[in-house]
């Protein structure tokens, strides 16, 4: 389904969001004070505009309140980031994603109504560190302080060649298997009879400690 997105702030983070959304054929309005950055995206996005998003009148005239999603990707200028988030909230945007520089900033953004607050550098750093420490963990997403979604590579003979029912991830680890990737083929919501093969990538969700336990078991 085609949706409208406005991306405010075209650093590496905002630019990358614009490119992926545009490649997925979504309507994208890109905004930045920096003309060069706007010009770079003009050929890719539906519309690209040079503007100071702290100016409420500008955002009103762009009818920002009618967008399905707004991404506030201004980083270092925390004051501008907060003000723009506040304005787009007041203009009625139903879904706002804002980039935070630190935990205090994230708390403020949540308080003023950002629906999603992201910390790209921190999250990517955590992901890289987890992968370095645990090569079997291919992807790691902390849903909150206690719950994690992870993609775990199946390399241990203890797991390979067995069905999900035999492996009973839920009883043994408290983990729910949400997908199995075998080569290019992904089975979402796999059945108990699905068999785990060598190097399959299992997406699991559950307590962070349980993901760690599964990883320890995989590398034994
Ligand atoms: P990134 O970490 O994503 O690469 P960056 O380090 O280039 O970003 P940031 O300070 O995070 O720079 O700003 C991201 C973008 O937001 C910049 O291109 C900047 O010009 C733009 N920006 C900053 N303030 C505003 C504003 N008030 N209105 C519109 N764009 C803004």
Image (cartoon, helix red, strand yellow):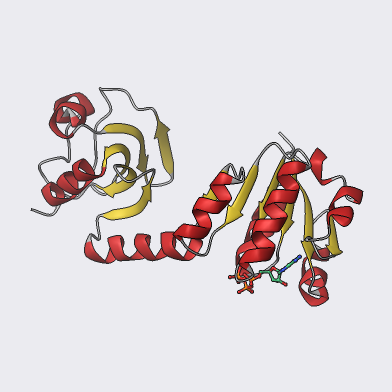
Q: Which is more toward the observer, 153 or 173?
A: 173
Q: Measuring from the top left, give residue 162's x and y in whole percent.
A: 17, 32
Q: Which is more toward the observer, 23 or 117?
A: 117
Q: Report ligand 1 position as a quadrant.
A: bottom right
Residue 146: which quarter of the image?
Answer: top left
Q: Is residue 94 left or right of residue 167?
A: right
Q: Measuring from the top left, give residue 159's x and y in whole percent.
A: 15, 40
Q: Measuring from the top left, give residue 26's x and y in whole percent.
A: 74, 45
Q: Is residue 94 left or right of residue 164?
A: right
The residue drawn where x is 11% and y is 45% is: 157
Can you see residue 15? no
Q: Which is more toward the observer, 202 or 41?
A: 41
Above or below, 171 against 102 in this view is above
Q: Which is more toward the observer, 210 or 21?
A: 210
The residue drawn where x is 51% and y is 54% is: 106
Q: Measuring from the top left, give residue 67's x and y in whole percent.
A: 78, 41
The residue drawn where x is 24% and y is 41% is: 197
């Amino acid at each position: 389904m085609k949706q409208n997105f406005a991306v405010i702030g075209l650093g590496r983070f905002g630019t990358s969001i614009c490119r992926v959304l545009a490649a997925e054929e979504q309507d994208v309005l890109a905004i930045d004070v920096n003309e060069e950055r706007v010009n770079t995206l003009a050929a890719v996005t539906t519309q690209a505009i040079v503007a100071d998003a702290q100016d409420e009148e500008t955002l009103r005239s762009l009818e920002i309140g009618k967008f399905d999603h707004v991404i506030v990707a201004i980083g270092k200028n925390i004051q501008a980031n907060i003000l723009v988030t506040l304005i787009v909230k007041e203009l009625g945007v139903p879904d706002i994603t804002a980039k935070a520089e630190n935990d205090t900033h994230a708390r403020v953004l949540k308080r003023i109504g950002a629906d999603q607050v992201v910390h790209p550098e921190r999250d990517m750093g955590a992901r890289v560190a987890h992968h370095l420490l645990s090569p079997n963990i291919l992807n790691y997403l902390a849903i909150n302080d206690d719950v994690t979604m992870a993609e775990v590579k199946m390399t241990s003979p203890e797991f390979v060649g067995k069905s999900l029912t035999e492996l009973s991830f839920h009883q043994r680890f408290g983990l729910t298997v949400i997908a199995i990737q075998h080569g290019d083929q992904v089975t979402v919501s796999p059945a108990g009879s699905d068999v785990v093969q060598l190097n399959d990538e299992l997406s699991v969700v559950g307590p962070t400690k349980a993901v760690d336990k599964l990883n320890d078991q995989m590398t034994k």
